[in-house]
Image (cartoon, rainbow, N blue to C red):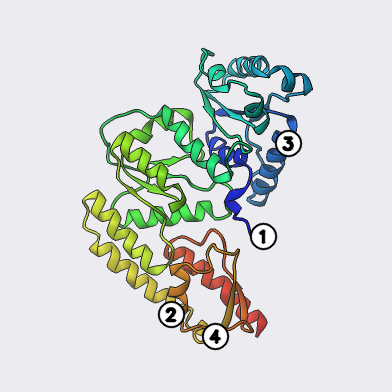
């Protein structure tokens, strides 16, 4: 059986968003095992990115008695203690256990604690996967947004905080937008303070990390009237299309930026011309990046022959972003080809 990486724990999906708020704490309302599993995962993934700090995560640590008689009092007590510690906001995530026993987590979170307390439904047993938690968190945090007239800023929405090249992707999008004379004002949600969540409603353009959160883009357009680009670009052609679309939505002429990008792409293609004509096969997680338009473009541009006995090249997930991402990918592939030969 093949399962998508987006089908993991709903809690993990939400935590990948809420832990991007630097001055907030996330409370997992459920058994200690739910928290332990996720803290261990975050520690491992962040360690691989040379990030030593573990996000602020708490747990109500429900035991047998709470499972039988309910855990609302335990949750309220933990929220009260946490609110007194000086955090600017508190996010509360439900687990399969508490939703199954019927705890009214929303009601507990709606009480007055002196700081904003935001409830995010993340029960997987009752319907939900990693992607569900990820989207629910992005939508729930919009309650902090200020509904104001567009201020000319651009918001990058839904960066995958647990992926390895998140900063490289951000730098690439920043480079592309700078060629249009603009830049990203808000990263929603990555390494920002609670008060910056208010800026979501002031954007002139939202850029989504990928198409999987299209419903989030639609919802924010409905709420704030903000147009959006549905995904970060993959491959050479999509990168130029991205510049065209961004220029159109921002009222800026993209011609010079697109011409400069095409020139850069030609230079990169020439630099990796030694890959041309190779017999290769591609390995990727089933149904993810291996059949993307960007892959078809690479095969055509470098006249590659797909052969099951060819040199095996790994297709990363997520696929690299923009022209710079293509350059990094081609560099890795060339090292593989040279090592085999």
Q: Residues within 10 Å of mark 1 (few under 14, many from 20)?
A: few
Secondary structure beneath dot 2 equals helix
Looking at the picture, how far across and down is residue 15, in whole percent?
Answer: 59, 38
59 or 195, nearer to the observer: 59
Q: Identify the image quadrant of residue 199.
A: top left
Q: Write the residue at 73% across / 25% down.
A: 61
Label 1: which residue? 1
Secondary structure beneath dot 4 equals loop
Q: Are marks 3 and 1 in contact (CB under 8 Å)?
A: no
173 or 178, nearer to the observer: 173
Does 239 sit above or below residue 194? below
| Mark 2 or mark 3: whose residue is earlier in sequence | 3
Looking at the picture, how far across and down is residue 102, in whole percent?
Answer: 62, 23
Q: Write the residue at 58% across / 44% down.
A: 130
For marks 2 and 1, give the CA distance.
Answer: 32 Å
Q: Are marks 2 and 4 in contact (CB under 8 Å)?
A: no
Quadrant placement of the C terminus: bottom right
For marks 2 and 3, give the CA distance.
Answer: 47 Å
Q: Is residue 136 visible?
A: yes
Whether residue 248 sits left or right of residue 159 in the image: it is left
For marks 4 and 1, give the CA distance.
Answer: 32 Å
| Mark 2 or mark 1: whose residue is earlier in sequence | 1
Q: Identify the image quadrant of residue 340.
A: bottom right
Q: Write the residue at 52% across / 64% down.
A: 289
* Residue 36 tag number: 3
For marks 2 and 4, give the CA distance.
Answer: 12 Å
* Residue 278 tag number: 4
Does 230 sit above or below residue 153? below
Secondary structure beneath dot 3 equals helix
| Residue reaching furthest to the right | 64
Label 2: which residue? 300
């Amino acid at each position: 059986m093949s399962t998508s990486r987006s089908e993991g724990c709903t809690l993990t999906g939400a935590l990948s968003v809420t832990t991007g708020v630097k001055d907030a704490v996330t409370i997992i309302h459920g058994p200690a095992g739910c928290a332990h599993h996720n803290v261990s995962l975050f520690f491992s993934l962040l360690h691989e990115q040379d990030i030593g700090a573990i996000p602020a995560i708490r747990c109500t640590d429900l035991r047998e008695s709470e499972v039988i008689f309910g855990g609302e009092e335990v949750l309220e007590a933990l929220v009260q203690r946490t609110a007194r510690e000086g955090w600017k906001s508190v996010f509360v995530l439900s687990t399969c256990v508490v939703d199954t026993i019927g705890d009214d987590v929303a009601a507990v979170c709606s009480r007055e604690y002196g700081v904003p307390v935001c409830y995010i439904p993340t029960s997987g047993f009752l319907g939900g996967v990693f992607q569900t938690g990820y989207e629910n968190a992005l939508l729930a945090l919009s309650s902090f947004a200020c509904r104001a007239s567009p201020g000319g800023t651009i918001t990058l929405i839904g960066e995958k905080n647990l992926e390895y090249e998140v900063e490289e992707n951000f730098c690439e999008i920043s480079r592309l937008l700078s060629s249009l004379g603009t830049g990203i004002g808000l990263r929603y949600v990555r390494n920002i303070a609670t008060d910056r969540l208010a800026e979501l409603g002031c954007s002139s353009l939202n850029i989504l990390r990928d198409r999987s959160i299209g419903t989030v883009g639609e919802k924010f357009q409905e709420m704030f009237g903000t147009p959006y680009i549905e995904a970060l670009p993959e491959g050479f052609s999509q990168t130029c299309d991205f510049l065209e679309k961004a220029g159109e939505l921002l009222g800026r002429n993209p011609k010079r930026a697109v011409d400069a990008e095409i020139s850069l792409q030609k230079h990169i293609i020439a630099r990796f011309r030694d890959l041309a004509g190779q017999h290769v096969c591609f390995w990727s997680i089933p149904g993810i990046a291996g059949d993307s338009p960007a892959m078809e473009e690479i095969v055509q541009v470098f006249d590659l022959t797909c052969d099951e006995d060819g040199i095996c090249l790994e297709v990363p997930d997520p696929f690299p972003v923009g022209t710079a991402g293509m350059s990094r990918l081609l560099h890795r592939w060339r090292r593989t080809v040279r090592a085999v030969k």
